[in-house]
């Protein structure tokens, strides 16, 4: 009887590890998807915003887009820039993403 209980505990622990790995994999796929398609979608919307007539001349410009995830594109390969994420250069990434003045509201 005791042997049966130990086997069940090991199975539950293994299932928990598998669920954790599954969630980590889904999170990684989502991060890559946002990195690749988020900027392209933002660029399409910004071009549309620049083409549509606005109330003033200042409204008739494309919206600047910035990536939430640091990435590089070299030789047609799009990669996450791990060096840019934690390079210690104290760059204000939230100010670049959300626009001027956001660096005072949000701390990286």
Image: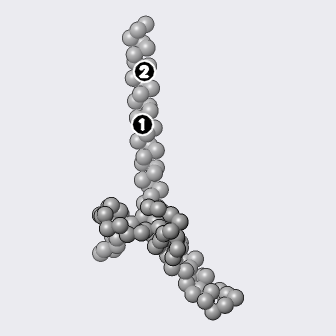
- CA gap, disc 1 and disc 2: 14 Å
Where is residue 2? Give x, y as percent.
41, 8
Residue 103 visible from this viewpoint: yes
Residue sitting nearer the eye, 80 or 37 = 80
Q: Counting residues from the N terminus, which is met first, the one under dot 1 or under dot 2?
A: 2
Label 1: few (<14), some (14–19) or many (≥20) C-alpha neighbours in 10 Å: few
Residue at the image position 31 percent from the left and 74 percent from the top: 74
Where is residue 72? Give x, y as percent.
34, 70
Residue sitting nearer the eye, 37 or 70 = 70
> Is there CB contact under 8 Å for labels 1 and 2?
no
Residue furthest to the front in view is: 104
Residue 40 visible from this viewpoint: no
Residue sitting nearer the eye, 52 or 70 = 70
* Residue 13: quarter of image: top left
- Point out the image quarter for the C terminus: bottom left
Residue furthest to the top in view is: 1
Q: Secondary structure at mark 2?
A: helix
Residue at the image position 70 percent from the left and 88 percent from the top: 55
Label 2: few (<14), some (14–19) or many (≥20) C-alpha neighbours in 10 Å: few
Residue underneath mark 1: 18
Residue furthest to the right in view is: 55
Residue at the image position 42 percent from the left and 53 percent from the top: 28
Where is residue 53? Give x, y as percent.
67, 89
- Point out the image quarter for the N terminus: top left
| Number of the label disc, if any, that sits on residue 36 | none
Residue at the image position 51 percent from the left and 79 percent from the top: 64
Q: Secondary structure at mark 1?
A: helix
From the viewer's perspective, tell me whether residue 16 is left or right of residue 82.
right
Residue underneath mark 2: 9
């Amino acid at each position: 009887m005791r042997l049966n209980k130990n086997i069940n505990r090991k199975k539950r622990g293994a299932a928990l590890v598998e669920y954790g790995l599954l969630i980590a994999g889904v999170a990684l796929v989502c991060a890559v998807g946002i990195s690749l398609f988020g900027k392209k979608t933002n660029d399409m919307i910004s071009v549309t915003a620049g083409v549509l007539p606005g109330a003033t001349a200042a409204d008739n410009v494309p919206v600047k887009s910035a990536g939430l995830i640091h990435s590089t594109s070299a030789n047609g390969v799009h990669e996450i820039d791990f060096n840019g994420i934690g390079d210690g250069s104290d760059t204000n990434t939230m100010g670049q993403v959300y626009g001027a003045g956001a660096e005072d509201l949000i701390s990286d």
